[in-house]
């Protein structure tokens, strides 16, 4: 059994849809226990039970919309609130990955995923990328392709600003997020089973 914790913030519901797709993908893998955690609900509560869920997880998935060239303020508050765990390196050697959403096709989403990856590195975590070739990048391609936005560090989604969460992000971006959930779950099972080198005792 491996545990996946998906911690996210969603300003208008679109990134929540993406988070739920990651959860769905993780739960498709036998031997996985996966849960969603709202970042805003725990950022200001050092004693919240959800912190224990993160501490016990084999992999932590980070998700937020991209606002003003980075993750949303409530999610950034969660990142900052983890500093005590950083000081103790409590999340060292956990797996990590991430996802983000914006209204623009580019929207500087890469900057958000880079911040997530650097955050994971500071915690001593091991980053898992999307693991998909780019979609929709040839004349035979389609907006229905997985990874239609051609991201590699994590899962990207695009949601029209005037579209409700029932319609956006589109199915291809939800399927890409689902793929990310399966990928991190499968990686966590391998990591937990000892099929990777273990650190020598100090």
Image (tube, helix red, strand yellow):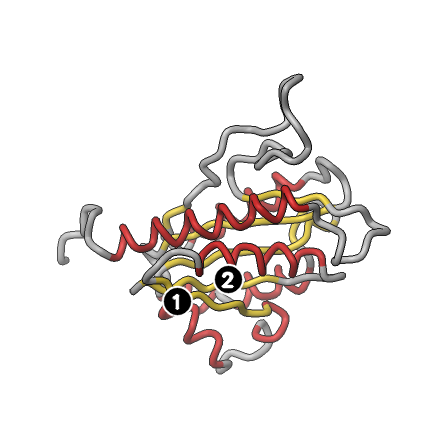
**Pointer 1: residues within 10 angstroms few (<14), some, or many (20+)?**
some
Is residue 121 visible in the rendered image? The answer is no
Report x, y in % for residue 177: 56, 48
Which quadrant is the C terminus positioned in?
bottom left
Depth check: 81 or 110 in front? 110
Depth check: 119 or 53 in front? 53
Report x, y in % for residue 185: 39, 54
The image quadrant of residue 8 is: bottom right
* For residue 180, side relative to residue 11 (left or right): left
Depth check: 200 or 139 in front? 139
Q: Which mark is residue 169?
A: none
* For residue 180, side relative to residue 12 (left or right): left
Task: Identify the residue at horizontal 48%, vertical 40% (top origin).
Answer: 130
| Residue furthest out toward the right | 162
Task: Identify the residue at horizontal 68%, vertical 33% (top origin).
Answer: 143
Label 1 residue SS: strand
Label 2 residue SS: strand
Is residue 1 visible in the rendered image? The answer is yes
Task: Identify the residue at horizontal 39%, vertical 67% (top origin).
Answer: 33
Report x, y in % for residue 100: 62, 49
* Relative vertical location of residue 174 with respect to residue 72 in this rendering, above or below: above
| Residue furthest out toward the left | 201
Q: CA distance from mark 1 to mark 2?
A: 11 Å
Q: Which residue is mark 2?
A: 6
* Relative vertical location of residue 2 with respect to residue 137 in this rendering, above or below: below
Report x, y in % for residue 172: 63, 42
| Residue furthest out toward the top | 139
Q: Which mark is residue 33?
A: 1
Q: How many badges with numbers are in the image?
A: 2
Which quadrant is the N terminus positioned in?
bottom left
**Pointer 2: residues within 10 angstroms few (<14), some, or many (20+)?**
many
């Amino acid at each position: 059994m491996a545990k996946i914790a998906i911690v996210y913030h969603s300003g208008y519901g679109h990134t929540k849809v993406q988070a739920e797709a990651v959860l769905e993908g993780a739960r498709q893998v036998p031997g996985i226990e996966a849960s969603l955690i709202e970042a805003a609900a725990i950022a200001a509560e050092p004693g919240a039970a959800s912190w224990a869920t993160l501490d016990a997880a084999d992999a932590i998935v980070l998700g937020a919309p991209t606002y003003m060239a980075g993750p949303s303020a409530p999610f950034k508050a969660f990142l900052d609130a983890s500093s005590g765990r950083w000081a103790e390196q409590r999340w060292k050697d956990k797996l990590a990955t991430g996802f983000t959403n914006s209204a623009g096709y580019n929207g500087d989403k890469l900057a958000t995923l880079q911040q997530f990856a650097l955050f994971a590195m500071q915690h001593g975590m091991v980053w898992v990328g999307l693991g998909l070739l780019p979609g929709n990048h040839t004349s035979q391609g389609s907006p229905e392709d997985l990874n239609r936005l051609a991201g590699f560090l994590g899962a990207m989604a695009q949601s029209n600003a005037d579209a409700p969460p029932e319609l956006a992000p589109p199915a291809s971006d939800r399927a890409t997020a689902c793929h990310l959930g399966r990928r991190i779950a499968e990686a966590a099972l391998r990591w937990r089973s000892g099929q990777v080198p273990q650190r020598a005792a100090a």
